[in-house]
Image (cartoon, grey):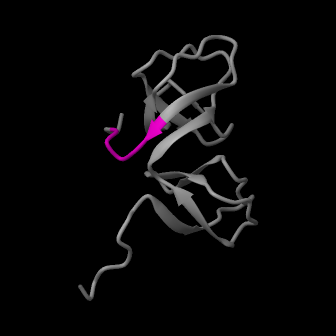
Amino acid sequence: MKNLVQQEGNLITIVAPSGGVVSGTGVLIGDALFGISTVTADAGASVEIATEGVFTLAKTSTAVIAIGDVLYWDDTNKVVNVTSTSQVPVGIALSAAGNPSGTVKAKLGRFIAAA
């Protein structure tokens, strides 16, 4: 196929946004493209993000999350939580995480419906 850009879509190459990215942290590009940075990179550098998979993500420490909850990305604080207002859905919780706790296991993917 002459129009094939990339066979798999699990890793996407993007330009690191202002402020750069840190390996293992979430990256939101625009209003819908979310992934986990595979490396630390300065703003403007090419970097791959994983857009699918299971990751342990930082969460709002006071958030109470149940298995199966939709997780939303708080791009200001670079954490997930369960508040949908003005935030982008990025995955499903695969572990419970109470208050206080700093992380939750999450399944990323584009199967999430917009809030």
Is 31 located above or below residue 84 in the figure? below
Point out residue 99 in the picture as x, y percentages from the top left corner: 65, 11
Who is closer to the viewer here, 91 or 113? 91
Q: Quadrant of the C terminus?
A: top left
Point out residue 76 in the picture as x, y percentages from the top left corner: 66, 41
Point out residue 5 in the picture as x, y percentages from the top left corner: 37, 78
Give the residue at x 61% y 42%. Answer: 75
Who is closer to the viewer here, 98 or 115? 98
Q: Tell me, yes or no, if residue 91 can be seen here.
A: yes
Residue furthest out toward the bottom: 2
Q: Quadrant of the N terminus?
A: bottom left
Q: Quadrant of residue 102?
A: top right
Q: In this view, does 102 lie to the left or right of 15?
A: right
The mark total stands at 0
Q: In which quarter of the image is residue 73?
A: top right
Q: Tell me, yes or no, if residue 89 can be seen here.
A: no
Q: Is the magenta stretch mostly helix, strand or loop?
A: loop
Give the residue at x 38% y 74%. Answer: 6
Q: Is residue 39 left or right of residue 57?
A: right
Task: Give the magenta-colored segment's residue range.
Answer: 107-112
Give the residue at x 55% y 68%. Answer: 14
